[in-house]
Amino acid sequence: MQKRVHYNTSYLPYLLVAPQIIITLVFFIWPAMQALYQSFLLEDAFGLSSEFVWFDNFVELYENPNYFDSFIRTAFFSFAVAGLSMGVALFFAALADRVVKGAHGYRTLLIIPYAVAPVLAGTLWLFLFNPTLGIMTYFLDMLGINWNHKLDSSQAMGLVILAAAWKQISYNFLFFVAAMYSIPKSLIEAAAIDGAGPAHRFRTIIFPLISPTTFFLLVVNIIYAFFDTFGIIHAVTAGGPGNSTEILVYKVFNDGFVGLDLGGSAAQSVILMFIVIGLTVVQFKYIERKVEY
Amino acid sequence: MVENRPMTTFISHSVLIIGVALIVFPIWIMLVASSHDALRLTQVPLPLLPGDQFWENIKLLFSSRTFGAPLHLSLLNSLAMAMMISLGKISISVLSAFAIVYFKFRFRMFFFWMIFVTLMLPVEVRILPTYEVVASLGMLDSYLGLSVPLIASATATFMFRQTFLTIPDELMEASRIDGASPMRFFFDVVIPMSRTNIAALFVILFIYGWNQYLWPLLITTDPDMYTVVMSIKQMLESGESEPMWHMIMLTSLFAMLPPVLVVIFMQKIFVKGLTDSEK
């Protein structure tokens, strides 16, 4: 889509795009190129000399079982976060769609987690599940469950999934509510006249009609779990115990800034960039299709 | 609602109330913990109801420097960073979207794609090289370093482009016939017509900026430049013994209050902006 008419001045448009283009070049394109270049280098630990090693860093990652594990872990983490937070949000949205009174109040409370920083969300959940003090640990103990995510790796994973999903419920809820609101009321009424109850209507009418939103949210949630959960992991487990909660983004940080393996970290960055590009393409394919409707 | 089923409605409300209570539970516990003294927070089970130490804790928090930077300073740093990121993003995006929509010029599509690419480069995947750029520009430990590298945004540019495309062409033609320059048209017509979008975007970007964590963590070493969100993690780690949970929770409260208030009070505009801009 374009305008029929345009201004014809020589220099003004360049001035207008200049700030954004300069920032993009200096802080986005150039560093990305650097990452690409560094991913082909092998640097010694003191950064004194470096050697061009072609794809060695990538081969090393490919052969490194730790990296492969981190990949699988990230995939599991992302789908668990997306599934949990979308499931809960859909459930709330379906209920909120039914009630007329108080819907605004529920929404106000449900959007709060959106505004909470990931690292704060992590801190709150860490406090709840603190192995010695936490109130949830206390309740779990009464149920006979011994909670210590500092030692038990599956409990650690469970806790970061919970904290990450909690934060994303608001976002999913708002989109589900908007999607349900846009379904024509006449469809619902027709089904009700034909004798379909609320649950039946949800299954056969509402859920299929909001499936584009569901798909869109799935992509957004996976991107979120991949990249925006750094703060949660950093606060709750710092990747541990062992490497059991070290997802890919955390590993880039850990290997680069803590382990000082610049080439390996850069190679990981490059792989992550390709993942983002893939996800973005999927997301935009979907948007294009949606525009045609 | 289609049919009247009092029982189903009742159940819906009950389940919603329980569900919302569960979602808000971590925040409730934060409020409770910040109103008790240090001693009470070492005794299991922890309290579920607020205590009476809230004001005492606030006084203690603001008077001490033992937790890194003084709180008011880190709140100020967070505010500066959030405002610079949100206003910066809005200004450069609105300008570049205006150029791309209303002008025909060489490399227009090239610039457009260049901006689009930034969508695919979140700061998390280019941290090391971006850090090096910022360091070589001497922008470590400064407000500029905290905000400028996060300012370029494809999403905001797209959203403004979308908005501008819905402004009728006749308005531009009319303003041209009346002899208005492009910039006059921009300030008198385009900006006022995108007011709602600008406000909605501001809410989203303010939260984004305020909640930044990894970036400030890397580029600030001077405690006087720490943001409040960062300082939480410092407090968690500072312990040789158990962390001071009442102070951590109180700081968390201050760290989440501004974005939470913004989202609650600008709720209507925020919800509209969120569901419109990302779809």
Image (cartoon, coloured by chain):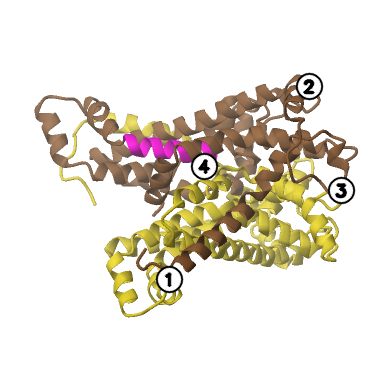
What amino acid is at disc 2?
Ser
Residue A28 shows which numbered tag?
Answer: 4
Classified by dominant secondary structure, the portion drawn in magenta counts as: helix
Q: Is residue A213 left or right of residue A291?
A: right
Q: Measured along the vertical axis of the image, is residue B89 above or below residue B70? A: below
Q: Residue furthest right?
A: B241
Q: Which residues are magenta?
A: B195-208
Q: Measured along the vertical axis of the image, is residue A170 above or below residue B100? A: below
Residue B64 shows which numbered tag?
Answer: 2
Residue found 50% across the figure and 35% down from its top: B262
Q: In what element is the residue under mark 4?
A: helix
Instruction: From the top left corner, tell me how far across and down residue B55 is, in percent.
Output: 72, 26
- Of the pair B148 and A55, the residue shown nearer to us: B148
What amino acid is at disc 3?
Val
Discs 1, 3: same chain: no
- Image quarter hosting the N terminus of chain B: bottom left
Q: Measured along the vertical axis of the image, is residue B64 above or below residue B5? A: above
| Discs 1/4, front | 1
Q: CA distance from mark 1 to mark 4?
A: 40 Å
Discs 2, 1: same chain: no
Instruction: From the top left corner, tell me how far across and down residue B85 is, in percent.
Output: 50, 33
The letter of the yellow chain is: A
CB-based contact (under 8 Å), mark 2 and mark 4: no
